[in-house]
Image: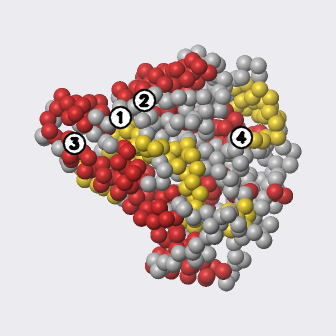
């Protein structure tokens, strides 16, 4: 027999009171939402080509669909805008057949030409898409994105040479460099979603702020009020509108765990995503409640080095910092949600892959390496900072600060900035060390390892290693699964044992809260993928 849900009493924070007033003011002129979700930080963008954060991606997946979409239960790719596809015997040619009833929310047909435009836009260097690497598996995709010169023609590769073209309005031909086991997963990822060419060309950078935005997904962008909410309204022209379960969804931005819990407890929110929005001081109590749900998750918490700054350009220094970290102390003292210390960057349980062992905890070896690098006992080590963006991460930073002082004799300053500035600082390499996390885009080791290739926009360390790049490329050209695994293991060994531009700290568990007696359509899966189209509250469908 399940324990009944116990409601906890809180004194509302000022931010909660302000938000309540905003919501009540809105309710006088607009219908109430059928579902209200705390979604995490305010999105930086809703452009599929530009987003990098998980909170942004949840909204984008509701607005824009790809050739495939995620199954709500398994997070595996299933038909989306494409109703079916054919794959050549060598696994390199995909022919997608679009649905005859796939139309923009404004009524125009969605065509194969729209897909070609959307993918070329991601690859175009002028777009500066950090996830452009998702399309490097296409023939000449990387060459076009990198503005390389074609040895045959003597000129730069053009968009027309990329391996995606429309055979007619409803048929798309995609040519890959090599067989790519996870390509259909990529087709469901936000970056490869289909966007409206005419609207973008007409309105430029303001296209998302100029209503009515034509969308290809299950929901329309009804309103986006910064620091208030994003309101989504069911798209009646979506090809699967009959199975879109909630008419209006409000997504509230919130980075405070206490505020999020207040909103949930008082009924102002129905669902809260992400463990970062669970008050850490109450974690032990809350996780015993039946409306708090944990699950294995495809994600790793880690920190990065900026290898372009001295002395972190020296692998010995980076290894010393890694070896001085007691990861078990962090998960037992701070995270406390069932996380496991991370030896490797790739989480255990990834399909078809066993990650190699990382450096582990060895303070004596850490001190030896730091002395060898010219800093015995931390003497003359320059001042440096650890970049972070929220209170939870500050607790980890304080623990690292203490470990490095105790074991290495070095002092680190904690530098906390707001989330948008934090992501910008990462991209611009404006940091010494910084806290980081990565949630797998699909269930394959490549989603963790290719991000540290030299030209990947998500690298954000300044680290480049030709051997690493070669191994990842060779692995993804392999048809033999065992040989592919071996090559990826060699690459990850360079990443976490030899060069160490990053240090994995722990493997995530997923944590979200909602009352299962009231909410349906949320299913646990390793990617934490919960399409909004499948979710409803009792009495609203």
Which quadrant is the C terminus positioned in?
A: bottom right
Which quadrant is the N terminus positioned in?
A: bottom right
Indicate the secondary structure of the residue bearing disc 2. loop
- Tell me which numbered mark, 2 or 3, is placed earlier along the sequence: 2
Instruction: Determine the residue positioned at 20% across, 41% down.
Output: 408
Residue 99: quarter of image: top right
Q: Residues within 10 Å of mark 2 (few under 14, many from 20)?
A: some
Mark 2 and mark 3 in contact? Answer it, CB < 8 Å.
no
* Front one among 177 and 196: 177
Give the number of callouts.
4
* Residue ID for mark 3: 407
* Residue ID for mark 2: 357
Which numbered disc covers residue 360? 1
Indicate the secondary structure of the residue bearing disc 4. strand
Question: Which label lies toward us, 3 or 4?
Answer: 3
Q: Residues within 10 Å of mark 1 (few under 14, many from 20)?
A: some
């Amino acid at each position: 027999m399940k324990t009944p849900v116990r409601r906890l009493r809180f004194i509302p924070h000022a931010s909660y009171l302000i938000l309540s007033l905003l919501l009540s003011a809105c309710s006088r002129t607009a219908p109430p939402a059928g579902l209200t979700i705390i979604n995490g930080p305010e999105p930086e963008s809703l452009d599929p080509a530009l987003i990098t954060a998980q909170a942004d991606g949840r909204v984008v997946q509701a607005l824009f669909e790809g050739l495939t979409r995620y199954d709500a239960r398994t997070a595996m790719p299933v038909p989306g805008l494409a109703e079916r596809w054919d794959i050549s015997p060598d696994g390199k040619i995909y022919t997608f057949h679009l649905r005859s009833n796939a139309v923009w929310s404004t009524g125009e047909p969605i065509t194969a030409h729209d897909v070609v435009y959307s993918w070329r836009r991601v690859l175009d260097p002028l777009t500066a898409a950090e996830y452009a690497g998702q399309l490097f598996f296409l023939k000449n995709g990387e060459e076009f994105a990198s503005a390389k010169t074609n040895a045959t023609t003597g000129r730069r590769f053009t968009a027309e040479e990329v391996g995606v073209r429309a055979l007619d309005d409803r048929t798309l031909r995609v040519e890959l460099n090599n067989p790519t086991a996870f390509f259909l997963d990529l087709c469901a990822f936000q970056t490869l979603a289909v966007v409206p060419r005419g609207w973008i060309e007409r309105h430029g950078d303001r296209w998302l702020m100029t209503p009515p935005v034509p969308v290809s997904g299950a929901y329309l962008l009804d309103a986006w009020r910064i620091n208030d909410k994003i309101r989504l309204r069911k798209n009646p022209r979506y090809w699967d509108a009959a199975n879109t379960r909630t008419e209006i969804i409000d997504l509230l931005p919130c980075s405070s765990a206490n505020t999020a819990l207040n909103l949930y407890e008082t009924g102002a929110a129905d669902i809260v995503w992400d463990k970062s929005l669970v008050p850490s001081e109450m974690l032990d109590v809350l996780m015993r409640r039946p409306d708090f749900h944990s699950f294995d998750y495809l994600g790793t918490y880690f920190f990065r080095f900026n290898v372009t700054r001295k002395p972190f350009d020296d692998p010995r220094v980076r290894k010393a910092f890694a070896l001085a970290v007691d990861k078990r102390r962090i998960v037992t003292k701070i995270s406390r949600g069932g996380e496991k210390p991370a030896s490797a960057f790739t989480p255990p349980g990834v399909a078809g892959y066993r990650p190699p062992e990382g450096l582990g905890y060895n303070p004596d070896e850490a001190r030896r390496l730091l002395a060898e690098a010219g800093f015995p006992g931390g003497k003359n080590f320059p001042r440096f900072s650890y970049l972070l963006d929220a209170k939870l991460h500050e607790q980890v930073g304080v623990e690292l600060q203490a470990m490095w002082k105790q074991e290495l004799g070095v002092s680190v300053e904690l530098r906390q900035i707001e989330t948008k500035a934090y992501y910008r600082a990462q991209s611009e390499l404006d940091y010494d060390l910084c806290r980081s996390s990565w949630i797998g885009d699909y269930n394959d080791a490549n989603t963790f390892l290719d991000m540290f290739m030299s030209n990947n926009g998500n690298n954000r360390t300044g680290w480049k290693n030709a051997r690493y790049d070669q191994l990842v490329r060779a692995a993804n050209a392999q048809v033999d699964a065992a040989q592919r695994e071996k090559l990826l293991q060699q690459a990850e060994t360079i990443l976490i044992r030899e060069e160490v531009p990053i240090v994995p700290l722990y493997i995530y568990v997923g944590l979200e809260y909602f009352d299962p007696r009231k909410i349906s359509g949320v299913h646990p899966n390793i990617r934490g993928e919960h399409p909004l189209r499948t979710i409803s509250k009792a009495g609203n469908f």
